[in-house]
Amino acid sequence: ARHFLQVQAEVYEEPLKRLTPAAAAALSAYAWPGNVRELANVIEHAHVLSHGDLVDVADLPPRLTARPAATRGGDQSLHMPTIERDTIAEALRRCGNNKAAASRLLGMNIQRLKRRMEILGVRGTP
């Protein structure tokens, strides 16, 4: 996890973020069926969502912190990639598809916005 935080800091040219003890414990407790690729994706996701220099449990996907009973039922309304995709699309809509303005509205640098758009498959509004 620390390695992938270092990678994200280099990619986005930002200071290195650290895991809170609770986030580190949640990462350690998870089974990681997707192995290292899943870990890399989770750390990238958490790095993008975190504020400041710490990655906390709230920045991790719900599947890492949810109790087993809470993960059943498939409530997509709280699916983080869906929420993130919708938020980026709405920011682009509000800014007339201007990525620089949308990145400012979202409080993220434009390189990160473009990367998240690519990963999430977000296109500009018609």
Image (cartoon, rainbow, N blue to C red):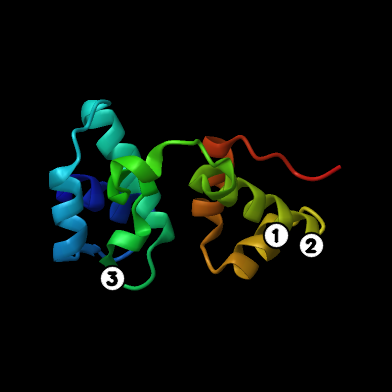
Q: Position of residue 120 (x, y in %)?
A: 56, 38
Secondary element type, mark 2: helix
Determine the image quadrant of residue 122.
Answer: top right
Q: Is residue 13 visible?
A: no
Label placed on residue 115: none
- Name the spot of residue 64 as percent of width and height, x first: 29, 45
Identify the residue shown where x is 56% and y is 41%. Answer: 76
SS state under label 1: helix
Question: What residue is drawn where x is 22% and y is 32%?
Answer: 32
Number of numbered tags placed on the structure image: 3
Q: Amino acid at mark 3?
A: Asp
Residue sitting at the far bottom: 52
- How far apart, in angstroms, are the residues tagged by discs 1 and 3? 24 Å
**Circle 1 residue:** 91
Q: Nearer the viewer, residue 96 or 61?
A: 61
Q: Badges 3 and 2: C-beta atoms under 8 Å apart?
A: no
Q: Earlier in the sequence, mark 3 or mark 2?
A: 3
Task: For the C terminus, give its image quadrant.
Answer: top right
Residue plotted at (34% across, 73% down): 52
The residue carrying pointer 2 sits among few (fewer than 14), some (14 to 19) or many (20 or more) residues within 10 Å by Cα, namely some
* Contact flag, marks 2 and 1 (Cβ < 8 Å): yes
Whole-Å distance between the Cαs marked 3 and 2?
29 Å
Percent coordinates x, y for residue 109 in the rendering? 51, 62
Residue under circle 3? 53
Residue reaching furthest front?
69
